[in-house]
Image (tube, rainbow, N blue to C red):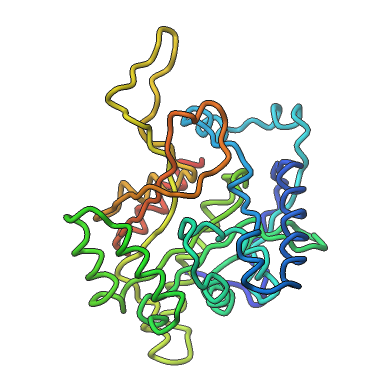
Amino acid sequence: MPRRPSGGRRFIKHQPLSFSPFMRSLALASRRKLHHHHQQEDSQRSGELMSFDQKLPTLSKKEQKEQLSDSSDEEDSQGDVQADFEFFDPKPTDFNGVKILLKNYLDDKEWDLSSFVDLVLEQTTVGTVVKVADDEDESVFAVVSALNLARYKEHKCFRELKEFLLQVCSEKSVAKDLEAMLEKKAQGVGVLVSQRVMNLPPQLLPPLYDGLFDEVSWATEDEPTEELRGSFRFKWYLLVTKIYKLKNPKQRKPRRGEEEEEETVFLKPEDELFLQLSSWSFTYPMRSQLVTSHEMKNYQLMGLVMAVEAKRIPEFRQMLNSLID
C-alpha cells in the first residue's frame, strides 16, 4: 500500500470538476460572516453561523441519481464553472469553514462544537479538508476524519456527544448496543466525521474516503507511540448523519401519473451504503430543519446514527467506487 506523500497537499484532482457559482458564493459569504462573528463573544456567534446544508434544496431520489450521472453538457448550459479541488491536511486556519459545515452535527443542541472542531484540526495524520485550488480565501468545502472515542473521552465535547446520542436513542433494542459502544467498547470506536457542501462533485467521494481509511491504516504503524498507534486500530465506526423520511408512508399513495415517493432520501449517497453495511442503526426526529424544495414537503428531516464494523470498510470502498463510476 503506497504511503501518502509528504506535505499537506494530497490526492490532487487535476481533472476540472463542475462547481456551482451559487455554492461558491455561499461559501465565501459564509466565511466572511463567520469571520465577523469571531470578533464578538462566543455566546453570541454560535447561534448565527450559516450552515451550507441549510441553504440548499434537497434533491429527490431520482434527482440524486441524475446528479451522480455524467451531465457535463447540462452543467455547462446552466452556467456552472470549472474548478480543481485539492485535498489538504487539516490546519488551524480551517476552523471557520469546518465549524460552518458541522454547525448542525448534533441538531440544534448547544454543545462545545468549537472544541470538537479543534480536535478534528489537530489530528493532521488522519483527516482531510477539501478546498478549491489556488483559492485565496481557502474556503472549506468538505471535511472527513475519524476520532477515537476513548482517546478524547475526557473532553467536554465528547461527553456532550455521548449524552446527546443516549438521549435521542428511543429504540430499546439498540440502546444497550449504543451504551456499550460509548463505554466498554470505546477504545476500538472511531467517530467518523464527514460533512460537505451539498453539490460537491460526487467524483471526489471515492478518493476522499479511500484517503481516510488508508490514513487510518498507516497511523497504526506510523504514529510515534504505541498508545497513539493503538488508538487508530478501530473495530467499529460510529456515524452521525441526516436523512429524510417520508411522513406517514403507509397512508400515501401516488396520484395518477405521479412516481411513488421513496420512503427514505439520503442527503449523502454513501450513507445508504453505510446503512446497508451497519450492524445496527436508529433514527431520531430533528428540530432543526433544512430549507427544502416543494417536492420535499411530505418528508421530515431525521438524524441517523449507524454502527459499522471496521471489517466491512473494504466492502464499502468497493461499493462506493461502483456507485460513482
**Residue occupying image coordinates x 29% and y 22%:** 251
Viewer-proximal residue among 177 and 285? 285
**Image side of residue 307 versus residue 109, left or right:** left
Q: Which residue reaches farthest bottom?
A: 225
> Is residue 52 something one can see in this rendering?
yes
Q: In which quarter of the image is residue 151?
A: bottom left
Q: In this view, does 308 lie to the left or right of 137?
A: left
**309 relative to 22, above or below:** below
- The residue sitting at 45% across, 65% down in the picture is 213
Q: Where is residue 189 in the image (x, y as percent from the top left)?
A: 33, 71
Specify whether residue 209 is in view: no
Q: Position of residue 117 (x, y in %)?
A: 56, 71
Total number of numbered discs in the rendering: 0
Which residue is outermost to the top? 256
Question: Residue 159: x, y in percent?
Answer: 39, 76
Vertical comparison of 227 with 257: above or below:
below
Front residue of this view, candidates 286 and 318:
286
Q: Give the left or right position of residue 196, taking residue 321 as reference.
A: right
Q: What residue do we see at 76% from left, 73% from top?
A: 39
The percent position of residue 201, horizontal first and vertical second, equals: 62, 45
Residue farthest to the right? 136
Residue in the picture at 29% in, 62% down: 309
Relative to residue 254, is residue 61 depicted above or below?
Answer: below
